[in-house]
Image (cartoon, helix red, strand yellow):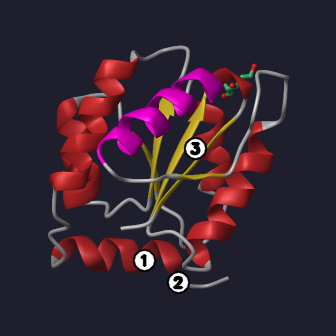
């Protein structure tokens, strides 16, 4: 599985921690920036990630801003993107099982690195259930 990761300055530290965590597990995340703690605009990173996912260059994206809210809103403006803010273990499973999220989102200033790692692992081992959930996803992607 190809996983890309991006953040604004509010998520930079957490992004680096996740890159290191997955690297130790033998999985190299594609780092789309930002590359330091200088202030940047989260929509730029959400847009970059959406392009990456929609063009098939990555199967899953991880986005981080200070709260996870702004970068979720920005990513979900893109048709075909299902960005889910994983804020507990139940949601981490359901975001895959029911929503088939293609981007998972975290708050660098509101969540701890260990809990975020746990949510990533839960999401990654969960399976999309399809069926009635697919008709709901289809409704979001129809029309202009
Ligand atoms: C940046 O200061 C902050 O607004 C951003 O990281 C995020 O929390 C927005 O939702």
Kindly report the distance in space between the C-alpha atoms of the residues bearing marks 3 and 1: 19 Å
Residue neighbourhood size for the residue with mark 1, other residues' Cα within 10 Å, grouped as few (<14), some (14–19), many (≥20): few
Which badge, 3 or 1, is on the more N-terminal residue? 3
Residue at numbered disc 1: 139
- Position in image of residue 79 (x %, y %): 60, 72
Tell me the residue at 15%/79% (across/down): 131
Vertical position of residue 17 compared to residue 5: above or below: above
- Position in image of residue 113 (x %, y %): 39, 20
Tell me the residue at 73%/25% (across/down): 9
Left or right side of 130 for 80: right
Left or right side of 30 for 117: left
| Labels 1 and 2 touching (C-beta < 8 A) | yes
Magenta residue check for 24: yes
Kindly report the distance in space between the C-alpha atoms of the residues bearing marks 2 and 3: 20 Å
Mark whose residue sits in front, 3 or 1: 3
Residue neighbourhood size for the residue with mark 3, other residues' Cα within 10 Å, grouped as few (<14), some (14–19), many (≥20): many
**Magenta segment boundaries in residue numbering:** 11-25
Residue at numbered disc 2: 142
Quadrant of ligand 1 in image: top right
Q: Which image quarter: residue 51?
A: bottom right
Residue neighbourhood size for the residue with mark 2, other residues' Cα within 10 Å, grouped as few (<14), some (14–19), many (≥20): few
Q: Is residue 107 visible?
A: no
Kindly report the distance in space between the C-alpha atoms of the residues bearing marks 1 and 2: 6 Å
Vertical position of residue 14 compared to residue 131: above or below: above
Mark whose residue sits in front, 2 or 3: 3
Mark 3: secondary structure: helix
Mark 1: secondary structure: helix
Q: Which image quarter: residue 2?
A: bottom left
Vertical position of residue 101 compared to residue 19: above or below: below
Which badge, 2 or 3, is on the more N-terminal residue? 3
């Amino acid at each position: 599985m190809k996983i890309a990761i991006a953040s604004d300055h509010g998520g930079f530290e957490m992004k680096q921690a996740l890159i290191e965590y997955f690297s130790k597990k033998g999985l190299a995340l594609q780092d789309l920036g930002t590359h330091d703690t200088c202030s940047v605009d989260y929509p730029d990173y959400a847009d970059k990630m959406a392009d990456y996912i929609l063009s098939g260059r990555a199967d899953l994206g991880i986005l981080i801003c200070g709260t996870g809210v702004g970068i979720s809103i920005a990513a979900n403006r893109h048709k075909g993107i299902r960005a889910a803010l994983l804020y507990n273990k139940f949601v981490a499973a359901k975001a895959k099982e029911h929503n088939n999220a293609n981007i998972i989102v975290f708050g660098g200033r509101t969540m701890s690195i260990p809990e975020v790692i746990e949510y990533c692992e839960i999401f990654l081992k969960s399976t999309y259930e399809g069926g009635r959930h697919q008709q709901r996803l289809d409704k979001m992607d129809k029309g202009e």
